[in-house]
Amino acid sequence: MSFADNVTDKLKQLESFTENSPLYLFPFKIASWTLLFLALIVTNILALIYWPFSAIAKLTRSEKTLSNQIVDISSEDELKKLVAKHDYVLVDFWAEWCGPCLLMSSAIESTSSKYSGEVVVTKVDASLNSTVSKSFGVRGLPTIIIFRKGVEFKRSSGAITFKQISDLVEEAKSQC
């Protein structure tokens, strides 16, 4: 499990504790929400620092395919054609300024490597392609949508780990 997956997993556990703990633990719930808020601020500050360097790299890159055969989508038609053409498509709606999105980037790359040839993994930069995000009803980042045989199978909003993404893909593949 990568560092980013560990951080995401721990934050999810903390969030789960905060939402499901009994009322008499209210002071701990406040502390947990404070810690989650601080973690969100830190990841977003790191993302904002990273953003200019990433933008420069994107300007110098000419190909549409990212590392590990991740396809960069820039239009709604392009995404619809890809979804219609392949049995399994995983779409990651993200933004360069989004801290949780950056935490998930290694999980997306690992998913692309693991399911190479079986699942087409794509990324849609929601800040640059807002019409695509709106047409697919994306309201929060990061959002993962898995399509099976041209139809949306499942979606998940918020940062998730490589294992959670793999579980979603396996679920889609097992239900034929």
Image: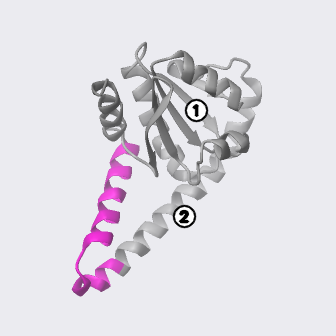
Q: CA distance from mark 2 to mark 1?
A: 24 Å
Q: Secondary structure at mark 1?
A: strand
Q: Is residue 33 left or right of residue 105?
A: left
| Residue 8 location (% of width, % of height) | 38, 51
The residue type indicated by label 1 comes to: Lys
Figure check: 27 above or below 156: below
Circle nearer the viewer, 2 or 1: 1
Tell me which residue sits at (58%, 57%) in the image.
44
Picture quadrant of residue 128: top right
**Residue 7 covered by magenta stretch:** yes
Q: Name the magenta segment's main secondary structure.
A: helix
Figure check: 24 above or below 100: below
Determine which residue is flagged by label 1.
Answer: 123
Tell me which residue sits at (65%, 28%) in the image.
73
Q: Quadrant of the N terminus?
A: top left
Which is more toward the observer, 70 or 103? 70
**Residue 5 covered by magenta stretch:** yes
| Residue 114 location (% of width, % of height) | 36, 21
The 10 Å Cα crowd at callout 2, few under 14, some 14 to 19, many 20 or more, is few
Tell me which residue sits at (49%, 30%) in the image.
151
Q: Earlier in the sequence, mark 2 or mark 1?
A: 2
Q: Is residue 16 left or right of residue 79?
A: left
Picture quadrant of residue 45: bottom right
Magenta stretch? 3-29
Q: Are marks 2 and 1 in contact (CB under 8 Å)?
A: no
Determine which residue is flagged by label 2.
Answer: 41
Q: Quadrant of the C terminus?
A: top left
Q: Secondary structure at mark 2?
A: helix
Rendered image: mark on residue 93: none
Figure check: 102 above or below 34: above
| Residue 130 location (% of width, % of height) | 71, 45
